[in-house]
Image (tube, rainbow, N blue to C red):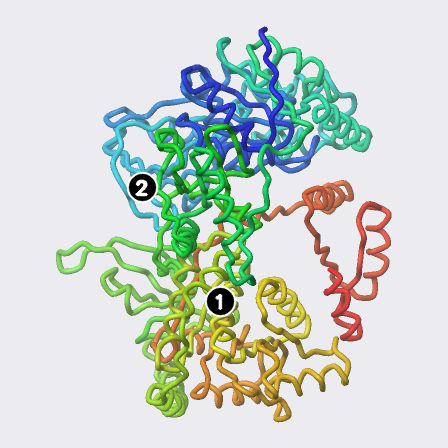
Amino acid sequence: MKQTTFFLNGSERTLAIARAIEMSDRLTVIITPNNLMNFTLENELKFFSTKTIFVFPDLETLPYDHFSPHRDIISARLSLLGHLSTLKNTIVIASINTLLQRIAPPDYLALYSLSLQKGQLLPLMQFREMLNKSGYRFVSEVFEHGDYAVRGSLIDLYPMGSDYPYRIDLLDDEIDSLRTFDPETQRSIQSVDTIQLLPAHEFPMTPEAIQHFREKWRDRFSGNPMQCDLYQSVSEGRYAAGLEYYLPLFFDQLATLLDYLPKHALLFKIDSLTASANTFWQEIHSRHEQLNYDRERPILSPDEIFMTPDVLLQQIDTFKHIDIKKNSTGENFSTDLSIDYKAAQPLHQLSHFLTAQQTTGKRILLTAETLGHRESLLKLLTTIDIHPVLISSWTAFQTMPAESISLAIASIETGVMQDDYLIIPENQLYGQRVASRQSRQKKKTEQNDLLVRNLAELAIGDPVVHIDHGIGRYLGLQTMTIDQKTDEYLTLEYAEHHKLYVPVSSLHLISRYSGASVEHAPLHHLGNPQWEKTKRKAQEKARDVAAELLALYAQRQTKRGFVFQLPEAEYTAFSESFPFEETPDQKNAIEQVIRDMCSEKTMDRLVCGDVGFGKTEVAMRAAFLATQNHQQTAVLVPTTLLAEQHFETFKDRFANWPVRIEAISRFRSSKEQASILSALKEGKIDIIIGTHKLLQKEVEFQKLGLLIIDEEHRFGVQQKEQIKSLRAEVDILSLTATPIPRTLNMALSTLRDLSIIATPPENRLAIKTFVCEKRNYQIREAVLREILRGGQVYYLHNEVATIHRTAGALAELIPEAKIEIAHGQMREHELEQVMVNF
């Protein structure tokens, strides 16, 4: 087919693609050398093009892997495959490695897809059987793609490829209503007329498909098939991990993504696809050689599962295509325009450059990654008397007059300079990119009440606490008619199998049991005074604690604290240097902390959020405000290792600011510690990080204005008493991932202010847990999969006496990995050193 070749780099390449397909409604497919480029192209095309954009995701598994892809990946792939032949005005992006893998033929999706609509007859048992054969998983509550649940006449279903799960309400055997619902709250959202149902896997599991698999297995492999767990699982109608690499046994003939494309599709080949495909082909053969001798799990040959690079590239060339290769001269426009905050005029270089470009008649476009960054950049430009026009699209920029300056929200990788226009991306001004910039596709709640789940999540057998009767065990809901009134009741079982029925209207009387052993919760006797005695003792102790706390917090409320002043320009610059996009909860927590510090009241705020949700950045914003007001900050952590980690994090974050940061720990010599304490006393240190040593009498501050406490509950009684004495004197910010009940209760009862970061960072994936028999090849695969993506691995062993032997065995199994040992019987400094190295 006709071929055109261009030599372009970076964002200029993306812009050229967008302009080439601007006037065409045909399907466009962009083939990239790697999955990372998929992400870049997708984000840039969202701004440069008005067309719909899809990425055909890679399975994200190793060739011949014993693990299956995440359900969301399968969902996205099936959704795109199901609509690919009819798409217009659409761009599809896929890597060459993804295209190499053979997939199910197009007629599979047509055969196993189903449409449901209101008023349709839907016998429940037949529908459940159909869902099971299509690979859907029966669960108690629907949260993931491919799940379904049945509760009476209600069917909750999360179809593959759907943005939302659906709730089907049956009236006898007829669909009475179809509604979407939020999987987090389980609340219905809106009514719909139809549902499109795709299969849950890229292969069938019907009796006919299972028989086909068994016959082809016996024809293809020698030996007794019953010795293979995977064969037995499929024979019994069960899905096995890694079954995606046995696709040829389910079908007579496989396809590739190209077989789903209409013949008039236009393809773009980016960079050297041949080199990338050949490298991946070598990896496939290497994996095949490693695993080909496993008799319990025989594998197919590479060319049965993958296309050879030569054949695939030839198939690509049958379509009309355009080659875009790298320009050896480098990026089109890469002038360093970084804002120098240390200079007297930070924006002088940018101002001079923009003025020079305007004199040539160019239209200038500045881009910011996010709305917040756009507003910050707008403020900075105002200080040099530049007032750009805010635009929302590339189309709008094309209508701007000569010498104009525009500002848009767009994720652009590199600058672009042409005769009549210039594009300057944010990273050329700030020197780095925002790490998380994809908007969430699913609706996310901004309420924090989801952090503590409600009683609807209780499982049968869970212990609960009734405020009047004590600890019982939840046995489920039961409909009862009392005094001619029918209502739902919670059934609670107490000691000696006595029952208590609680109407749903009295749910406020019941709470979760939070004792140490849920399985062995001590059930109370109904009518026995034991529970009343327990409550009375707790109330007496609570009164003593309350009296002490009230005195302390009364003092805190009445005493005027230091009122911090917010330096707008400096604080904005520091915030903009944060290399991630703030989550809504994180942004809210930061605003609350800054507001507290700028008020007359002494701050005592608890920030609660899971590990990795951004609590440290909240602390660093507070510390920055303290340094700009010439107040010292102490960061108190429970372990030496954590002190060193925070020390490195704070140093990196404050690298461009004249802030001195030090740490007190065993990693410092006595002489170094003495020098640090002397400088701290003289006010020469702005931020000090350390363990409980910071609370000792010999540690003196000149102007301590902020105390940041990480995981306060991990400190001892004596340290907590010392912390308590500081609460009325300085602003205190506590960070925790797991607040103890007393700390959380104080926050919820407003004795301490509370900020909850319940929203995970963008693109943070759920933890996947696999339970399987211990096998060396699975250990090696799991470790290699993590190493290949640049990650690290914890290998937990349950016995110190044999840990060195296990480490030796791992070294032989995975020579590519560097292995260190850590256990509780090591000297403390040795253990810490291992963890620091890790």
- The quadrant in which residue 803 appears is bottom right
Tell me the element at label 2. Answer: loop
| Distance from Cα at disc 1 to Cα at disc 2 | 51 Å
Q: Residue 715's x, y, as percent?
A: 58, 80
How many neighbours does mark 1 have within 10 angstroms: few (below 14), some (14-19), or many (20 or more)?
some
The residue depicted at 34 percent of the width and 83 percent of the height is 532
The residue depicted at 53 percent of the width and 26 percent of the height is 93
Q: Is residue 813 above or below residue 417?
A: below
Q: Is residue 191 visible?
A: yes
Q: Residue 545's x, y, as percent?
A: 41, 89
Q: Is residue 20 left or right of residue 458?
A: right
Q: Is residue 652 above or below residue 311?
A: below
Type of amino acid at the residue the image marks with label 2: Gly
How many neighbours does mark 2 have within 10 angstroms: few (below 14), some (14-19), or many (20 or more)?
few
Q: How many marks?
A: 2
Please tell me the numbered disc located at residue 621: 1
The residue depicted at 37 percent of the width and 38 percent of the height is 164
Task: Point out the image quarter for the N terminus.
Answer: top right
Foreground of the two, 274 or 475: 274
Q: Is residue 483 above or below residue 62?
A: below
Q: Residue 147's x, y, as percent?
A: 44, 38
Tell me the element at label 1. Answer: helix
The residue depicted at 70 percent of the width and 31 percent of the height is 63
Q: Which residue is mark 2?
A: 152
Q: Which badge, 1 or 2, comes first in the chain's sequence?
A: 2
Q: Residue 469's x, y, as percent?
A: 33, 75
Foreground of the two, 375 or 315: 375
Task: Point out the image quarter for the C terminus.
Answer: bottom right
Q: Is residue 524 visible?
A: no
Foreground of the two, 654 or 406: 406
- The quadrant in which residue 797 appears is bottom right
